[in-house]
Image (cartoon, rainbow, N blue to C red):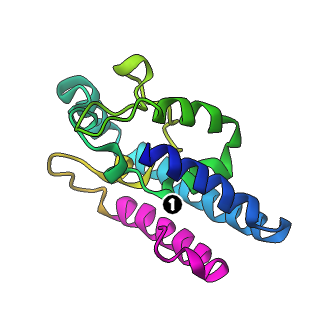
């Protein structure tokens, strides 16, 4: 229920922006997407380990609401609002207890988020040493931080929401 509310709140926030603010928001979100593309290209072998060896353990037995925050939903919906209904349907499966991520298709995956449209923690978290990709991880974090600052500057009442 908490994640469903975050998704709805993200949509409300997006709707509150005027045309110019939406253009800037989308521009920042595209920067995040480009940074994710860069990370994906450099970290390919690490993602292969995630899929091949770990089999998505980081998506199992978790509290999704603690991993995917309002800012992530704003990022995703600002670039692809067509996924709103799908996100809401997935979020209706949220459990009060730890469970597999409800954004895994049919409960096993793949993830409903595209490879360059992932929540921040989902794309920058690795469970092993990842030499050579610190710069790309930092870039993704930096772009999410820029998005946060933009939203807080334009909607200061959201300080406690993010």
Mark 1 Cα shell of 10 Å, populated few (<14), some (14-19), many (≥20): many
Foreground of the two, 50 or 105: 105
Outermost right residue: 19
The residue located at (45%, 46%) in the rendering is 3
Foreground of the two, 138 or 64: 64
Q: Is residue 142 magenta?
A: yes
Please state if 56 lies on the left or on the right of 22 as rendered: left
Please state if 13 lies on the left or on the right of 58 as rendered: right
Foreground of the two, 26 or 71: 71
The residue located at (52%, 71%) in the rendering is 148
Please state if 154 lies on the left or on the right of 105 as rendered: right
Q: Does the magenta stretch include residue 154?
A: yes
- Range of the magenta residues? 135-162
Residue 52 shows up from this direction: yes
Foreground of the two, 154 or 39: 154
Outermost left residue: 128
Q: In which quarter of the image is residue 15?
A: bottom right
User: Can you identify the residue that label 1 sits on?
Assistant: 71
The residue located at (44%, 22%) in the rendering is 105
Q: In which quarter of the image is residue 69?
A: bottom left
Q: Is residue 57 above or below residue 133?
A: above
| Element class at badge 1 | helix
Q: Quadrant of residue 21?
A: bottom right
Outermost top residue: 106
Please state if 92 lies on the left or on the right of 29 as rendered: left
- Where is the N terminus found, in terms of image quarters? top left
The residue located at (64%, 77%) in the rendering is 155
Q: Position of residue 7 (x, y in %)?
A: 55, 48
What's the magenta bit mostly, secondary-structure-wise?
helix
């Amino acid at each position: 229920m908490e994640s469903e509310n975050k998704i709805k709140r993200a949509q409300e926030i997006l709707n509150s922006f005027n045309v110019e603010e939406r253009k800037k928001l989308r521009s920042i979100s595209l920067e995040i997407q480009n940074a994710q593309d860069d990370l994906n290209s450099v970290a390919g072998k690490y993602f292969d380990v995630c899929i091949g060896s770990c089999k998505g353990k980081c998506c199992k037995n978790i509290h999704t609401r603690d991993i995917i925050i309002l800012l992530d939903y704003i990022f995703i919906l600002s670039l692809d609002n067509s996924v709103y209904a799908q996100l809401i349907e997935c979020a209706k499966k949220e459990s009060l207890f730890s469970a597999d991520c409800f954004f895994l298709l049919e409960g096993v995956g793949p993830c409903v988020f595209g490879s360059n449209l992932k929540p921040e923690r989902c794309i920058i978290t690795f469970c092993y040493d990842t030499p050579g990709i610190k710069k790309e991880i930092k870039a993704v974090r930096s772009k999410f931080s820029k998005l946060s600052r933009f939203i807080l500057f334009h909607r200061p009442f959201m300080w406690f929401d993010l």
